[in-house]
Amino acid sequence: MAKRKAATKALTNKSCRQISDLVFDYLNEKLTPATKRDFEQHLSICPDCVSFLNTYKKTVAVTSSVKVEQLPPKVRENILAFLRKRIRRIGAFLIFLATYLAA
Ligand SMILES: [Zn+2]
């Protein structure tokens, strides 16, 4: 068991913080094959980063398809509430988005 755990750890040598920094490049196909493999391996063992990635995709879809003024207030509130809750964990990108949506 201990051996297996060590192997898993070696496969996922990226932290959640590093993953959040790579999401943008991942979605834009800018990662090197090795980094992409690390990224996907991390996702396979980390539900937090999977849900972050999904939220990121949804947020990008919403913010790039409509102007901020056109967002229903409820949607905007939900996104802002989500961002404020998670900012501590996921860093610069979400701070940027929150600032953008709150403007
Ligand atoms: Zn993670």
Image (cartoon, rainbow, N blue to C red):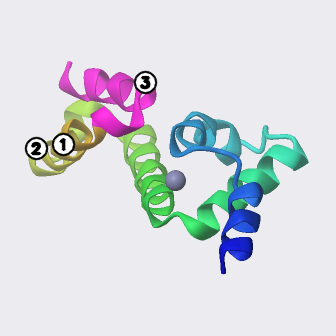
Q: Secondary structure at mark 2?
A: helix
Q: Dot 3, how many residues are within 10 Å of its Cα: few (below 14), some (14-19), or many (20+)?
A: few
Against 76, residue 53 (above or below) is below
The residue under the point 44% across, 29% down is 93
Residue 17 locus on image (x, y percent): 51, 38
Indicate whether residue 73 is drawn in magenta.
no
Q: Secondary structure at mark 3?
A: helix
Q: Residue furthest right?
A: 33
Question: Which dot marks residue 99?
Answer: none
Q: Earlier in the sequence, mark 3 or mark 2?
A: 2
- Disc 2 target residue: 73
Mark pair 1, 3: CA separation:
19 Å
Q: Earlier in the sequence, mark 1 or mark 3?
A: 1
Which region shows up in magenta? Answer: 87-103
- Disc 3 target residue: 92
Q: Amino acid at mark 2?
A: Pro
Q: Is mark 2 within 8 Å of ligand 1?
A: no
> Residue 63's image quarter?
top left
Residue 83 as seen in the image, left or right of residue 49: left
Residue 11 locus on image (x, y percent): 76, 59
Residue 19 locus on image (x, y percent): 59, 43
> Residue 58's image quarter?
bottom left
Q: Residue furthest front?
A: 2
Q: Amino acid at mark 3?
A: Ala
Front-lying residue, 72 or 86: 86
Q: Is mark 1 within 8 Å of ligand 1?
A: no
Against 43, residue 99 (above or below) is above
Quarter of the image that includes the C terminus = top left
Quarter of the image that includes the N terminus = bottom right
Q: Amino acid at mark 1?
A: Arg
The residue under the point 30% across, 23% down is 100
Residue 103 as seen in the image, left or right of residue 9: left
